[in-house]
Image (spheres, helix red, strand yellow):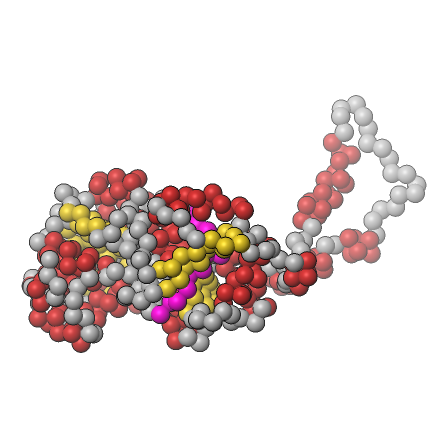
Amino acid sequence: MTNTFEGLALDTRILQALAEEGYTAPTPIQAQSIPIVLEGRDLLGIAQTGTGKTAAFSLPILHRLASTPGRPPRGGCRVLVLSPTRELASQIADSVKTYGRHLGLSVAVIFGGVGFGPQRAALARGVDILVATPGRLQDLLDQNAGRLDHVTTLVLDEADQMLDKGFLPAIRRLLKTIPKERQTLFFSATMPQEINRLAAEMLNDPARVAVAPVATTAEKVAQRVINVPASGKRRVLAEILRSEGVGRTLVFSRTKHGADRIVKQLDHDGIAANAIHGNKAQNARERALAAFRDGSAPVLIATDIAARGIDVDGVTHVIQFDLPEVPETYVHRIGRTARAGASGEAIALCSHEDRDKLRAIERLIRQTIPSEQRPGATAEELAAQPREAPRPPRQQQNRKPQQQRHPQHRPAGHAAPKPQGSVKPASAGDQTRRRPAAVSDEPRRDRSWREGDFRDVAATAARRGR
């Protein structure tokens, strides 16, 4: 195995770009994968996050394209790279452009959350290397704005996520439009057995490269668990972020609205943070990442899928506010720190409800994570926490009409009782007093950021428009 890029027999123009970026020696995944890809074989590559998988497939792909010149097909591409997130797709495209800057090859990136116009135009011209998320690419194909019948190489990056339940149907739809005679490359940090079986269906006699055992955590990550009741997680998180030596920090939340809630809580504690997740607009996600990179907002709260595209140097700490449901995800999370030979610290906040998840993680990584105990929040701290607006009394609103209609549904043979003299028909003033709209308007505005509550916002807007 060579320890220089020159020994891999890559195009001299690629070597020039690597030298300009200061890259002199390939990582293990690159040294083992590049010769296999240059031969044209299918490949299943497994390596920890942050070990250079993008260059492991992009460098030999660029070499092969440069050695077989030709115009890309109009409306299509020669190489297709699929990514699970917008951020990762953008990061891959930037890396490919950097490595191939002297080759004159075209690169385009396609993902959701932005307009279709520029993406249609890029496909119409034809592109050598297309990096895309499956959903937006399928949308363009459905609009007859693209074609994949000239793809010679298909890459699935973060294959464990790409072939997970949420992505597999889209992948299979796209595969039907790609020639069967192609080179297929899978790269991932983890490869659970069930995903391994699916990969075996799509790869043709693949070579397998594993530079680290499945679910092995990076050696330079110092891991620890803080056992704390759920009520104390917020206080402990703020204490960690204020500690000496804590710099750029990535905090993981299990849900999108949970990430937004953590940002609000940290803001109340005087700590500036941003959130990144699937419900955020693309420009908001890009602003949050830019602030994270330049250090103006060094705390970023993320969900797992959104974090797949975060490749930022100098992340000193990864904090798991919520432990993941899938143990392999733990490895992905802590791989965000200790990148490129640096060291880092990974801290998991574990409540009593998280104990089973922690045991599953320790079984997976075959080690016991050092732990410490912290108390929960005090009564004063709980009282000082910002409270969410109460839910409007929807059930009460629904029950009133039912109570009024109830006499109409009496059993057969029983007449509805006539109104007594003391019961008066409801006057306009009474109806006004019983209307719940004035009670529920403000809470609905306060809760409009929550996932699933956008129908309330629309209803409020409709009432105001009357």
The location of residue 357, given as percent across then percent down, is 45, 45
Image quarter hosting the N terminus: bottom left
Of residues 221 and 185, the one drawn nearer to the viewer in this rendering: 221
The location of residue 429, given as percent across then percent down, is 82, 56
Q: Quadrant of residue 418?
A: top right
Range covered by the magenta-colored residues: 314-325
Magenta-span inclusion, residue 196:
no
Of residues 409 and 335, the one drawn nearer to the viewer in this rendering: 335
In the rendered structure, the answer to whether residue 287 lies left or right of residue 110 reads: right
Seen at 41% across and 75% down, the residue is: 295
Seen at 27% across and 52% down, the residue is: 188
Magenta-span inclusion, residue 316:
yes
Residue situated furthest top in the rendering: 413
Q: Quadrant of residue 453?
A: bottom right
Image quarter hosting the C terminus: bottom right
The location of residue 403, given as percent across then percent down, is 76, 40
Looking at the image, can residue 399 be seen? yes
